[in-house]
Amino acid sequence: MGEKWVLMKTAQTPTNIAVIKYWGKRDETLILPVNDSISVTLDPAHLCTTTTVAVSPAFQQDRMWLNGKEISLSGGRYQNCLREIRKRAREVENKEKGIKIEKEDWEKLHLHIASYNNFPTAAGLASSAAGFACLVFALAKLMNVEEDESQLSAIARQGSGSACRSLFGGFVKWIMGKEEDGSDSLAVQLVDEKHWDDLFIIIAVVSSRQKETSSTSGMRESVETSLLLQHRAKEVVPKRTLQMEEAIKNRDFASFAKLTCADSNQFHAVCLDTSPPIFYMNDTSHRIISHVEKWNRSEGSPQVAYTFDAGPNAVLIARDRKAAAQLLKRLLFSFPPNSDADLDSYIIGDKTILKEAG
Ligand code: ADP
Ligand code: DP6
Ligand code: CO
C-alpha cells in the first residue's frame, strides 16, 4: 500500500414511512423491537440520504460530517455499525489506482464519512432510517462486503431500528425475531415498488424543526410507563400485521387505509399514555386528520390514508393520481403553505412547494 491514495464510494438511500409502527425496544443496545413493523419506501428523489465514505492511509481517525457539520462517532450506534461492517470487510483491489487493501488492513485504516439529507433531519420524517441504511450500504460497497440486503439490514438496525427497512424498495416488513443475539431481527421485502404503483404520496411538512423528544428517548419512556404499549405490542400489532400484509398483497386500499390510520392513531395514543406524555402531533396535524376523515366519509370509500411518525408532519397516501390531485387542491385551500406559520411546505410526486424564507 502506498500512502497517498484515497478510495471513495457514494450511495443514495431513500427514507421509509411505517404504516405499522415500530415503537419500543426489548433490547436497547442491539435495537430489538417489541413488535413487527411494516413500511413503504419513499421516492428517493425527494427524501433521501447521500453518503460518501472514503478510506486513506493518510486519515488519522474515523470522522463523520452530517449536513456539512462534524458529528461525534463515539456513540454506540455508529461504533456498532462500523464494527459489524469492518468484521465482514474483504480484499479490495483497484488496479487503475494501483491500490490493494488486504482483509486485515481494514482494521487499521480510518474512514472519513460525509452525509447529506435532502429533507429535514430529526423532524419526524425518518432521517435516521435513510441515514443509517445509507451509511451501512456505502461502507459495504467500499469494503466489498458480500452480505445480501437482509443481512445488511440487521447491521443498519443497530444504527437505528427503522433503518433496516430502508434497504429495500416497495413495502417492507421488519420481522422482530426471537433470538437474543438479534440474528433473526431483520427486514424482508413484501412486494417491490411496481406491485402497487397507483399509490401517490404527498407529505405535508407542518414543521421542519427538530423535534424535542428523539424517537429513541420517546420510545424508551413509553416502554417504561405505558400500559397501552404492552397491549398494543402483544394483542394488536400481531393481528394487524397479518391484515396489513393481506391488504398490500391484494391492493385493497379500503383495508390498507383503515389499518394505516388506526395504527398511526394508536401509536400517538401510546405517546399520550406515556408519563410524562409526549406530543408529536400539533394542532395542524389534528386538523389534517379531521379533514381527511371527513372527506373519506363523504366519498363513501377511503381516498386517502394518513400516517404521522414521531413528529407533526403528515404522510398522506392517496389511492391514485386522481385522488392525489383532489387532495392537493383541498390541502392548498385549507392549509396553504406560505400564508402563516401553520404549514411549511408540501413534498409531492416530483415537485416541492417551499415556503419562502422569512
Ligand atoms: P427522525 O425522525 O428524523 O428519524 P430521530 O430522532 O429518529 O429522527 O433520529 C435523528 C438522528 O439520526 C440524528 O440526530 C442523527 O444522529 C441521525 N441521523 C440523521 N441523518 C443521518 C445521516 N444522514 N447519517 C447518519 N445519521 C443520521
Ligand atoms: C415513529 O428508528 O428513529 O418512526 O431505533 O431508536 O433509532 P431508533 O428509533 P427510530 O424510530 C422510528 C419510530 C417511528 C416508527 C417507525 O419508523 O416504525
Ligand atoms: Co428516526
Image (cartoon, rainbow, N blue to C red):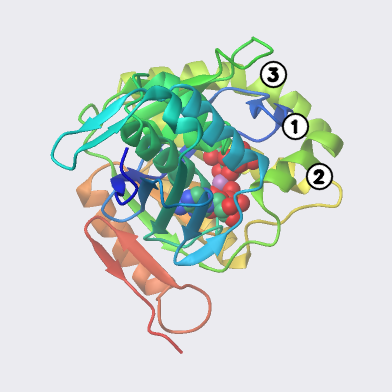
Task: Please give the residue where the numbered disc 1 appears in the rendered image.
Answer: 229
Q: Which residue is mark 2?
A: 274
Percent of width and height locating residue 79: 60, 38
Q: Is mark 3 within 8 Å of ligand 2?
A: no
Residue nearest the viewer, comparing 22 with 337: 22
Note whether residue 127 is visible: no
- Residue that extends furthest to the bottom in the rendered view of this protein: 358
> Is 15 above or below relative to 329?
above
Identified at 45% across, 73% down, the residue is 344
Label 3 amino acid? Glu
Q: Label 1 to label 2, Cα distance in Å?
A: 9 Å
**Relative to 46, is 115 on the left or the right?**
right
CA separation in Å, label 3 and label 1: 10 Å
Q: Is residue 29 visible?
A: yes
Dot 2: element: loop
Q: Residue at x 40, y 27 (%)?
A: 172
Tell me which amino acid carries mark 2. Answer: Thr
- Estimate how packed mark 1 is, as few (under 14), some (14 to 19) or many (20 or more) residues with alpha carbons within 10 Å: many
Neighbours of disc 2 within 10 Å: few (<14), some (14-19), many (20+): many
Q: Position of residue 77 (x, y in %)?
A: 62, 39
| Secondary structure of residue under mark 3 | helix
Q: Which residue is mark 3?
A: 235
Q: Are marks 1 and 2 in contact (CB under 8 Å)?
A: yes
Q: Earlier in the sequence, mark 2 or mark 3?
A: 3
Above/below status of 345 relative to 72: below
Decide if residue 216 is on the left or right side of residue 297.
right
The type of residue carrying mark 1 is: Leu
Disc 1 under 8 Å from ligand 2? The reply is no
- Element under disc 1: helix
First reached walking from the N terminus: tag 3 or tag 1: 1
- Residue found at x 34% / y 30%: 168
